[in-house]
Image (cartoon, rainbow, N blue to C red):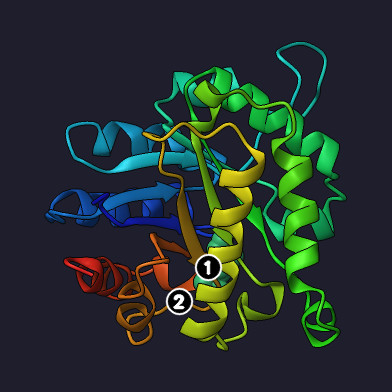
């Protein structure tokens, strides 16, 4: 059985000193049986990488640009993320899709680049409230997934994690119910095995994100279909994030 994976997405929060304090608290604690990754904002990635380098914590970028290098003012490449020690990168987060017009083609290009570099692409998918109400959740997920993963080889797929984050659950305090998550994760798993070149020894992890907290985490993570959590707000504070990590042990 693979260990649960918990990723803390710090989004656009925390100054360098705050990020380093939180990283240090996490690095000083153990979390046997759970894989933990933190995704600080760009300004904190390098100092945080130095703090956690002897620990079991993984490091993720929250985004990157799909060019390799050159005249792209304000952008960060996947090679730069690798250079500062990132093992993971978030791709296609709904905030990037909605606020920064990220399209599926660009997301696919990023997934290709990250996986070729041996960096795990955490591919985010999820429906709006309206899409759910209209009964279109699974069609939306299928469309996002098929476009994000098109052209990926079996080898690259070993570096893919899917994060199901219903948009209506992000930052609202209303998490999807375990039954809703299980239904969608089952669909994602079936889709991946039927349409992608997953070999038998590649088991894609499927995470849930959206108002995960120390209270609801255990109930979600004890579902066999849910391989971990992508946590926003509750990852900004040591107590709440560590409680989430702890609740995953043995889940
Ligand atoms: P919240 O946990 O704050 O709902 O955010 C979820 C998320 O967007 C993680 O990427």
Does mark 2's beta carbon lie closer than 8 Å to ligand 1? yes
Q: Position of residue 45 (x, y in %)?
A: 45, 37
Q: Say which of 42 and 159 sits in front.
A: 159
Which residue is labeled 1 in the image? 209
User: In the rendered image of this protein, does residue 244 appear above or below residue 88?
Assistant: below
Classify mark 2: residues with Cα within 10 Å, few (<14), some (14-19) or many (20+). many
Query: Quadrant holding ligand 1?
Result: bottom right
Q: Position of residue 31 (x, y in %)?
A: 16, 56
The answer to whether residue 114 shows anywhere in this view is yes
Q: Which mark is residue 140?
A: none
Q: Position of residue 98 (x, y in %)?
A: 83, 60
**Cα distance between the residues tagged 1 and 2:** 6 Å
Q: Are marks 1 and 2 in contact (CB under 8 Å)?
A: yes
The answer to whether residue 77 shows anywhere in this view is no
Secondary structure at badge 1 equals strand
User: In the rendered image of this protein, does residue 74 appear above or below residue 130?
Assistant: above
- Using the rendered view, name the quadrant where residue 47 is placed: top left
- Using the rendered view, name the quadrant where residue 247 is placed: bottom left
Q: Say which of 32 and 21 sits in front.
A: 32
Secondary structure at badge 2 equals loop
User: In the rendered image of this protein, does residue 25 appear above or below residue 64?
Assistant: below
Classify mark 1: residues with Cα within 10 Å, few (<14), some (14-19) or many (20+). many
* Figure quadrant of the C terminus: bottom left
Residue for point 81% across, 87% down = 133
Which residue is labeled 2 in the image? 212
Query: Does residue 124 appear to the left or right of 107 in the view shown?
Result: left
Residue for point 54% across, 25% down = 154
Q: Position of residue 221 (x, y in %)?
A: 34, 72
């Amino acid at each position: 059985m693979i260990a649960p994976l918990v990723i803390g997405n710090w989004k656009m929060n925390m100054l360098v000193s705050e990020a380093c304090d939180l990283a240090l608290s996490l690095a000083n604690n153990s979390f046997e049986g759970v894989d933990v990754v933190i995704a600080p904002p760009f300004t904190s990635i390098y100092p945080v990488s130095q703090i956690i380098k002897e620990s079991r914590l993984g490091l993720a970028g929250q985004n990157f640009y799909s060019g390799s290098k050159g005249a792209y003012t304000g952008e960060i490449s996947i090679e730069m993320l690798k250079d500062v020690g990132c093992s993971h990168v978030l791709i296609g987060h709904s905030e990037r899709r909605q606020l920064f017009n990220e399209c599926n083609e660009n997301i696919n290009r990023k997934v290709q680049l990250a996986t070729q570099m041996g960096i795990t692409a955490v591919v985010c998918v999820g429906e709006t409230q309206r899409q759910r109400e209209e009964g279109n959740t699974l069609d939306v997920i299928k469309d996002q997934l098929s476009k994000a993963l098109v052209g990926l080889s079996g080898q690259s797929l070993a570096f893919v994690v899917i994060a199901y984050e219903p948009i209506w659950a992000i930052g609202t305090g209303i998490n999807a119910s375990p039954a809703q998550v299980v239904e969608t994760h089952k669909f994602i798993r079936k889709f991946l095995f039927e349409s992608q070149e997953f070999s038998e020894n590649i088991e894609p992890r499927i995470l849930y994100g959206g108002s995960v907290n120390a209270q609801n985490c255990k109930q979600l993570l004890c579902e066999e279909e849910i391989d971990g959590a992508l946590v926003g707000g509750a990852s900004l504070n040591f107590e709440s994030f560590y409680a989430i990590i702890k609740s995953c042990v043995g889940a």
